[in-house]
Amino acid sequence: MRVHGLPDGEQESLRNESGALRSITHFVEQTQTVAEGDSVDGWDVVSLPGHADGHLALLRDDVLVAGDTILGAITPAVGLYPEARPNPLDDYLSSLRRIAELGPRVAFAGHGEPVEAPAERAHAIVSHHDRRLEDTAEVLRTAPQTAYEASLELWPERLAPVLRRFALAETCAHAEYLVHAGSAERHEDGGLVRYGAAA
């Protein structure tokens, strides 16, 4: 977050928040590794990365246990994080298109109500990110800037630290998508990463 422009004062707040989350996270002692193509008690394992690199879902009889890949009331956060895959938004958009192709009747999300028309919702979330990419490209046309600076233009309202972290991580993901598409450039300058429109 620091190299993408997060100010020092906000870094400490996020560090404290992460420590609190760590204290309530526990690993299961006995695990079984599964991957795309495996079956678990009659459920097909489906890889749907983007919201998280190794995100897996389960599909059986037109029912998708989707986790946070698709949510009904909000759009799942898609961010660029350390040691993550280089283009998480591209991964996520591919996962949404895959959900539409699979055509489940219902998707059970990680939280919130079941999604009754998953293909339709997947298309709506793709459209949302298309608009967000246009907004990000427009912001980057003004001048090279850090993802934090761009996030302040994309989400100008005052946000709680956890929401500002999501806004920054999502801005990074959108900016990196544009870099991979050739529409933006990434420069390292004095320990900071700045993004600007492609020349």
Image (tube, rainbow, N blue to C red):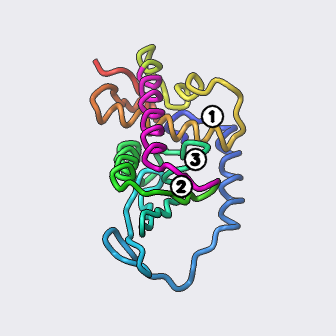
Q: CA distance from mark 2 to mark 3?
A: 10 Å
Visible residue check, residue 44: yes
Frontmost of labels 3 and 1 is 3
Q: CA distance from mark 2 to mark 1?
A: 29 Å
Q: Position of residue 17 (x, y in %)?
A: 70, 52
The amino acid sitting under disc 3 is Gly
The relative height of residue 89 versus residue 67 in the rendered view (above or below) is above
Q: Which residue is mark 1?
A: 7
> Which residue corresponds to the image point at 33% horizontal and 32% vertical from the top-left?
179
Q: Position of residue 85 (x, y in %)?
A: 37, 52
The dot on residue 72 is 3
Q: Position of residue 59 (x, y in %)?
A: 42, 66
What stretch of residues is rendered in magenta? 113-137
Asked if residue 122 is among those painted magenta in the image, a careful observer would answer yes
Alpha-carbon neighbours of circle 3 within 10 Å: few (<14), some, or many (≥20)? many
The dot on residue 68 is 2
Determine the image quadrant of residue 47.
bottom left
The amino acid sitting under disc 1 is Pro
User: Does residue 71 appear left or right of residue 144 in this picture?
Assistant: right
- Tally the marks: 3
> Which residue corresponds to the image point at 69% horizontal and 38% vertical from the top-left?
9
